[in-house]
């Protein structure tokens, strides 16, 4: 049963990988692991995809430990060992700097910047060509609405982004998977989950947008689907998919 579930979900991941040409022959992909359901399912599905995809690629897992008390990544390490995946855990003092020393009014921005810096250091050290992030369908819609509502801009992260400073390409293979489906599949596969104790988890602007979309969707059930479709049809830069069957060399 679990194999069928993973196969079905991986087909959704492959659709995104193919339509946005996310993976090439010989790629060494770092999967950014927060310990949450999104990144853990991304790891499971990319590892499964690597066993049959026409292009050969490697997957490794990378975690930036922010320094919150009570976050134990041992189950993640054990899961990686079970799959034969290398696991890199980088301990940092990001929590202390953001919350205790700097006492930021907008801690999420500084935290994200410091996480990116730590990730780039690992990527450069270990020779990765791609960084896979666990942003899914709902994240894309929420990010677009965040920019519209709070900044007055029409923008969103891209499915594929080349980072000039690190020379690494970011990919987001979960963009066709909704948050609820991700949660259901992660639970069905009994993936190890590390709970996030960050105090901003339920008080951020993103959380406000998530609640707004939830309420609006009661009257307009296809709202998020239409917003996501607009990203692709407009198209936002980098969001136009290649609907043709991908040709493999």
Image: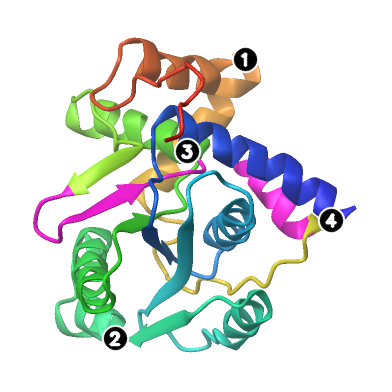
Q: Which residue is at 82% across, 54% downward?
A: 3
Q: Measure the alpha-carbon separation of dots 3 and 4.
A: 22 Å
Tag nearer the camera, 4 or 2: 4
Image: 49 above or below 227: below
Q: Is residue 180 visible?
A: no
167 inside magenta stretch: yes
> Which residue is disc 2 drawn over?
92
Q: SS of the residue at dot 3? A: helix
Q: Measure the alpha-carbon separation of dots 2 and 1.
A: 44 Å
Q: Measure the alpha-carbon separation of dots 4 and 1.
A: 35 Å
Q: Quadrant of the C terminus?
A: top left
> Which residue is disc 1 drawn over?
219
52 inside magenta stretch: no
Image: 192 above or below 26: below
Q: Which residue is at 40% across, 21% downward?
A: 241
Tag nearer the camera, 3 or 4: 3
> Which residue is disc 3 drawn over?
17
Q: Which residue is at 15% across, 61% downward?
A: 166
Q: Measure the alpha-carbon separation of dots 3 and 2.
A: 31 Å
Q: Measure the alpha-carbon separation of dots 1 and 3.
A: 33 Å
Question: In front here: 97 or 112?
Answer: 112
232 sits to left or right of 108: right
Tell me where residue 235 sits by quadrant: top left
Tell me where residue 218 sits by quadrant: top right
Q: SS of the residue at dot 4? A: helix
Q: Position of residue 56 (x, y in %)?
A: 48, 54
Sequence order check, earlier mark of 4 and 1: 4
Give the residues in magenta. Answer: 163-187
70 sits to left or right of 63: right
Q: SS of the residue at dot 1? A: helix
């Amino acid at each position: 049963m679990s194999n069928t579930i993973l196969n079905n979900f991986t087909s959704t991941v492959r659709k995104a990988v193919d339509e946005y040409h996310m993976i090439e022959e010989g790629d060494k992909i770092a999967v950014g692991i927060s310990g949450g359901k999104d990144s853990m399912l991304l790891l499971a599905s990319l590892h499964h995809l690597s066993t049959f995809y026409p292009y050969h690629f490697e997957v490794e897992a990378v975690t930036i430990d922010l320094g919150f008390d009570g976050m134990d990544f041992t189950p993640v390490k054990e899961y990686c060992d079970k799959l034969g995946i290398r696991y890199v855990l980088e301990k940092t003092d990001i929590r202390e700097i953001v919350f205790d020393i700097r006492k930021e009014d907008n801690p999420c921005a500084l935290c994200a910047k410091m996480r990116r810096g730590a990730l780039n250091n690992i990527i450069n050290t270990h020779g990765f060509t791609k960084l896979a992030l666990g942003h899914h369908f709902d994240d894309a819609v929420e990010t677009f609405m965040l920019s519209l509502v709070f900044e007055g801009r029409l923008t969103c992260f891209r499915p594929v982004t080349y980072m000039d400073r690190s020379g690494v390409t970011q990919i987001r293979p979960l963009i066709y998977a909704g948050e609820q489906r991700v949660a259901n599949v992660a639970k069905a596969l009994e993936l190890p989950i590390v709970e996030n104790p960050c105090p901003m988890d339920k008080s951020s602007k993103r959380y406000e947008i998530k609640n707004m979309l939830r309420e609006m969707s009661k009257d307009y059930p296809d709202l998020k689907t239409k917003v996501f479709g607009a990203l692709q049809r407009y198209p936002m830069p980098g969001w136009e998919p290649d609907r043709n069957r991908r040709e493999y060399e």
